[in-house]
Amino acid sequence: MDTRQRICRAIDDYRSRAITVSHAIHEHPENRFEEVFAAEQLCAAAEALGLKVDRPIADLKTAFRAEFGSSGPTVAIFAEYDALPNGHSCGHNLISGAALSAVAGLHAVASDLKGRIVFMGTPAEEGGGGKILLLNRGALKDVDAAMMAHPMDGDWATMPALATCHIQIRFRGKAAHAAIAPWAGSSALAAVLQTFHSVDMARLHFRDGHRIHGIITNGGQATNIIPELTECRFVTRAYTASYAAEMAKRVVLCAEAAAMATGTRAETSTIAGYKNMINNMTAAHRYAAHSETLGVPAPDAPRDLPTGSTDMGDISHAIVAIHPVFAISSPGEGTCHEDAFVKHADSERGYNAMIRVAKALAMTAYDLLAEPELLSQAKAEFAANRDS
């Protein structure tokens, strides 16, 4: 039995424990930065494998790191475990279960590794940018490559995740009695509504495949008062961070024009969000090859595949990174962030996929350590594409 077969055998042997941990996390959803239960489950499982777990790390109370192997290059396997207000509708319990399983498989062959494996807990992917904080605070300074896999309704070796930009807008008008003297006021609500209308008109001029969406977070204080304060938020998404920022500038212009038209004042702030994902094709294609041997083809995702955004994008701008996706539902049955996806994340199909993907991840990580030319090729590709 060769090393890769031993890795897969170990993952199969660990199946029951991994599903128990993943199910427990699914049944105890926690929002970003508050994943105390999930982090404890994963750390306890890692410690039971014999790993020394450092926690917390990077001043993030629910982040952790464990490592093993020998001197040489380092590959990190990321676990995400935060939920959304409607539960684990993004299936992060399966992401953490797959990462834990992959680590269990690799730990079983630790003496054969030509480098180190890092098991890293990365909180707050859902809007908190936990991986960005870990990156900026030096938690990945010694890591050569990073990987994880995300559940969806299809199997792809790559993910065309979009860059984001967040815009916060506040309008200040003048209050007046809405019946006695409405002419004496300036409606901040009218400014918000005009902004949304202008943004909708601008959609025609944005490039194909890009997205913009927003909500009103404060629409006024009372129906019989001309609203003097309103607030709204928008997010732009694009294939590159630079175009997401360009779209955000257009939103700000819409807000300023609305303020001028309604006699109000606009206060805007723009914050860069997640970067686009630069899929390392060298590593992704090795993952795809392993997925194929496990019975499930994982081709490159088409560029126009409907997609979202992830803080793994920022990691891919700093080091070699892959973010394959795997099917736990079929198209039309529910996908990420939908209520229907919660049950798929705790299903037999979901757990079977989790174990299979763990094997593909683990063998890919092993190959990056065992084959210096593979890692060198991946790094050369990264260097050529890091600014894309």
Image (spheres, rainbow, N blue to C red):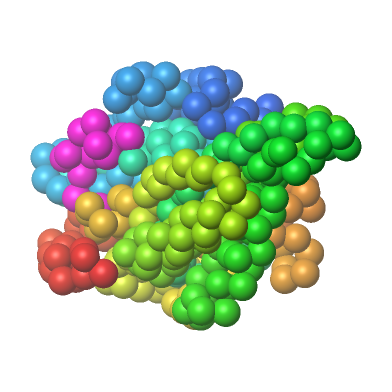
> On the rendered structure, is 95 left or right of 51?
right
Residue 81: image x %, image y %? 54, 36
Q: Position of residue 138 (x, y in %)?
A: 20, 33
**Place of residue 265 in the rendered image (x, y in percent of width and height, measured from the top left):** 52, 43
In this rendering, does residue 126 appear at all?
no
Q: Nearer the viewer, residue 280 or 170?
A: 170
**Image coords of residue 376 (percent x, y):** 13, 65
Residue 279 falls in image quadrant: bottom left
Q: Where's the N terminus, which quadrant?
A: bottom left
Residue at 60% across, 30% down: 31
Instruction: Write down the region rendered in magenta.
Output: 133-150
Can residue 222 be seen at all in this image of the molecule?
yes
Q: Is residue 209 magenta?
A: no
Judge left or right: residue 205 versus residue 223. Answer: left
Determine the image quadrant of residue 158.
Answer: bottom left
Residue at image location 16% in from the left, 71% down from the top: 384
Which residue is farthest right? Answer: 179
Q: In the displayed structure, would residue 3 be above or below residue 206?
A: above
What count of labels does the image hold?
0
User: Which residue is drawn at the image coordinates 69% and 54% (left, top)?
Assistant: 193
The residue lying toward the viewer, choosing from 187 and 354, is 187
Up-down relation of residue 364 to residue 348 (above or below): below
Q: Is residue 58 above or below residue 92?
A: above
Direction from residue 180 to residue 245 in the image, left or right: left
Q: Nearer the viewer, residue 298 or 225?
A: 225
Q: Quadrant of the C terminus?
A: bottom left
